[in-house]
């Protein structure tokens, strides 16, 4: 299993994965923080999958959501589930939407990239963030690579160390708000909440 296998896997299992995706909205405190701290309503959902429950919730709360995914099948599903959103097919490692957003989220998506590609993707995230923008993303608790499972198919996961992510924050002008490694509140996920510095020179 390699990072290159991720998109073909989600093309194969996307509908089954979306149908079974937990929709209890345990992510709600993070989504509310994102909207409450973002300087405006324009949000970018990176690796949106089928749009449930995250993009759907953000739209229902009044956000103007742009969502992107690298799997054509997931883009189609997200458009069905969240027709109010602008849903794009794009590679999170190298996209240019020609605009900046008030808030960004990469929930259980960014960690499917290799460590080297995560650095490239984070540069893209930063290029699409306004000064003062908020960002929520998930990672592993420390540096490493692993294999998970979705709908019976193996999937690649990777993470930088906390120090590695903090180095990216420093390079691209972000302040850390919270780091929650393997949070029991958030079902064992490792969560980062960060803010783009208002004085950062793009």
Image: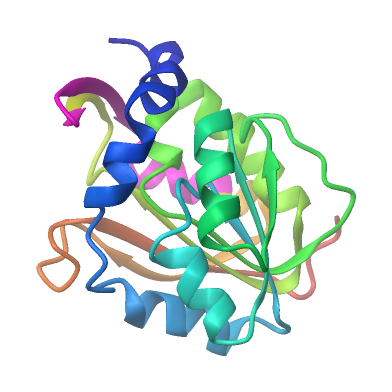
Against 67, residue 168 (above or below) is above
- Residue plotted at (58% across, 30% down): 72
Q: Name the spot of residue 164 as percent of width and height, x first.
A: 43, 39
* Residue furthest left as drawn: 184
Q: Is residue 161 visible?
A: yes
Indicate left or right for 52 with 126 as reference. left
Is residue 150 covered in magenta? yes
Instruction: In this rendered view, identify the residue nearer to me: 2 or 18.
Output: 18
Q: Tell me if residue 23 is in the magenta stretch.
A: no
Q: Nearer the viewer, residue 115 or 189?
A: 189
Left or right of 201, for residue 177: left
Q: Which residues are magenta?
A: 149-168
Instruction: Tell me, yes or no, if residue 176 can be seen here.
Output: no
The C terminus is located in which quarter? bottom right
Q: Is residue 22 left or right of residue 53?
A: left
| Residue at (29, 29) in percent of width and height | 157
Give the x, y percent position of residue 155: 27, 23
> Residue 101: x, y in percent?
75, 65
Residue 190 spot, x, y in % from top left: 25, 55
Q: Residue 195 lies in what quarter of the image?
A: bottom right
**Where, quadrant-wise, is the N terminus in this rendering?**
top left
Please name the residue shown 49% across and 70% down the image. Answer: 56
Q: Where, by quadrant of the figure, is residue 135 drawn?
A: bottom right
- Is residue 177 left or right of 129 when viewed as pictured? left
In the rendered view, would you say 43 is above or below 39?
A: above
Give the colour scheme of this rendering: rainbow
Q: Is 86 above or below relative to 92?
A: below
């Amino acid at each position: 299993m390699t990072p290159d296998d991720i998109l073909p896997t989600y093309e194969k299992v996307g509908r089954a994965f979306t149908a079974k995706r937990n929709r209890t909205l345990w992510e709600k405190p993070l989504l509310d923080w994102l909207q409450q701290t973002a300087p405006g309503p324009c949000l970018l959902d990176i690796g949106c999958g089928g749009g449930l429950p995250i993009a759907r919730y953000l739209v229902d709360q009044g956000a103007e959501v742009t969502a992107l995914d690298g799997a054509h099948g997931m883009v189609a599903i997200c458009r069905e589930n969240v027709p109010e959103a602008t849903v794009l097919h794009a590679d999170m490692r190298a996209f240019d939407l020609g605009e900046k957003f008030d808030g960004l989220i990469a929930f259980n998506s960014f960690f499917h990239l290799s460590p080297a590609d995560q650095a490239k993707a984070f540069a893209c995230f930063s290029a699409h963030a306004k000064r003062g923008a908020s960002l929520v993303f998930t990672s592993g608790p420390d540096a490493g690579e692993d294999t998970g499972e979705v709908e019976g198919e193996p999937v690649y996961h990777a993470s930088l160390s906390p120090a590695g992510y903090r180095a990216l924050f420093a390079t691209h002008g972000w302040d850390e708000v919270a780091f929650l490694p393997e949070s029991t509140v958030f079902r064992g996920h490792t969560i980062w909440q960060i803010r783009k510095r208002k004085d950062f020179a793009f």
